[in-house]
Every structure is written in C-alpha cells, then in structure tokens.
Image (cartoon, coloured by chain):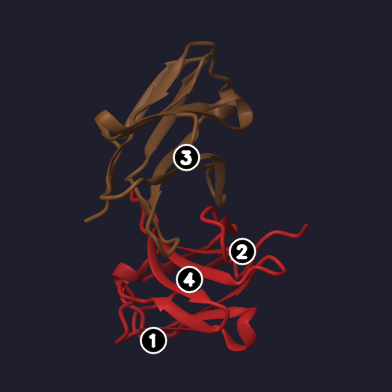
Amino acid sequence: EAGVAQSPRYKIIEKRQSVAFWCNPISGHATLYWYQQILGQGPKLLIQFQNNGVVDDSQLPKDRFSAERLKGVDSTLKIQPAKLEDSAVYLCASSTRTAYSPYFGPGTRLLVL
Amino acid sequence: AQSVTQPDIHITVSEGASLELRCNYSYGATPYLFWYVQSPGQGLQLLLKYFSGDTLVQGIKGFEAEFKRSQSSFNLRKPSVHWSDAAEYFCAVASNTGKLIFGQGTTLQVKP
C-alpha cells in the first residue's frame, strides 16, 4: 500500500512570496489533515477535511493560508504572502473515516528568508 | 482544554539500558492516546495507541506504554534501547473529531 505522498520535499522562498504544497493521501482515506510543525515543537493542526468538506480550520491563519481538497482526494495548501514565522515542516496525514490514528507523509520543509 | 505535556525535552540513555518517556494529558472524557516517533527528516510513525481495554499497550519496535487514568499519564517504555531508537518521540491525544493534539516532544539520544 502506497503511503501519503507530499511535494515538494523542500522549499526556500523570500518573505511576501507565495508557495503551495501538494498532498496525495492513501487511497480510500476520507479524512485528510494538514499539520504545521515548527522547529522544537509538536505538530499543530491547521485544517482537517472529511472528503471535500472542512471539519476543523480553527487554527488556520485565514488571512494568508488557504487549503482545498477538490474531489475529496488530493489537497493543496497555499501560503500567500509568506512570513518568516511560517518556516516549518508541513505534514499531511490521512485516515479512514472511523480511524483515529492517521498516517503521516514525509512532510514539506519550508524556509522563509 | 485538551493538552499534552511531555516534561522531558531531552533524554540520554546508554545502549542496552531501559527507557521511560513521560507523557501527561488533560482530557475530559476517556482519551484516545498515541505515541509517534520521528526520525530526522522523516514523517511521523505510529508506535502504539490506546483506545480502551488493557491499560498496558504493546507497540512496534519493542515499545510499550501504560495508561494510568488516576495519574493522567501514558508513559512509553522499552526494556533495552538500541542505537537506532535515537529520534524524537511525540505523545498525542485525539479529540472527538480525530484531531491529534501533540506534546512538545522528547528527543532521545543513545550513547554507545
């Protein structure tokens, strides 16, 4: 079984630029999560999708972050414009509808200069 | 509010020695608890989870954890540590929507 795929793996941008990350969950997984992991901290949920609907986006900075999951499969997370404090690893995870232990992708490491 | 505390930021043990990583949680209902491991540059891998039943949970790679409701704890243990266990370990609790709330993490260093 293929795991959660993410791209790119690394990205370096300057502040005020925009960036997008892509995630392909495990086939058949209805629930998709985006977590932000700042260096030295545990991951923090940004947004949770159930199929193509949003379950929780309470900690998503909506003035600059956006996410979509068209057709309930792949997802894209965008930051526009980026700030220095957005430097982090962005982890995508997926799970079946009834599971509580998601599978995590390798993450995208973002550095904002 | 739900929260997870991992009191030890960094732990060093000798190879072959036993290991215990501490985790305390705050959650109103019966918690769903997890331990994940993260090697440098890698994503998170699930070691074990507790949903209900036997309070001593066995996981992969020889790890186990014990749920103690009276102490609000879910400590991770391993009887004999290998050099390959050096990594960062995260304890987490799940909300009723499946969202995971993570602790700050404990970095494990293994001395030869």
Residue B16, image x, y percentages: 54, 11
Single out the mark in the foreground, 1 or 3: 3
Q: Secondary structure at mark 2?
A: loop
Q: Mark 4: few, some, or many residues within 10 Å (few <14, many ≥20)? A: few
Q: Hue of chain B?
A: brown
Q: Hue of chain A?
A: red
Name the residue type under label 3. Answer: Ser
Tell me how far mark 4 sits from mark 1, CA to CA: 14 Å
Nearer-the-camera pick, B68 or B63: B68
**Cβ–Cβ below 8 Å for labels 2 and 4?**
no
Residue A39, image x, y percentages: 36, 53
Tell me how far mark 1 sits from mark 3, CA to CA: 43 Å
Name the residue type under label 1. Answer: Gln
Tell me how far mark 2 sits from mark 4, CA to CA: 33 Å
**Cβ–Cβ below 8 Å for labels 4 and 1?**
no
Residue at image mark 1:
A80
Chain name for mark 1? A
Chain name for mark 2? A
Farthest front residue in view: B53
Residue A61, image x, y percentages: 30, 79
The residue located at (58%, 20%) in the rendering is B82
Residue at image mark 4:
A12
Name the residue type under label 2. Answer: Thr
Say whether disc 2 or disc 4 marks the residue closer to the N-terminus. Answer: 4
Say whether disc 4 or disc 1 marks the residue closer to the N-terminus. Answer: 4
Which label number is shown at residue A96?
2
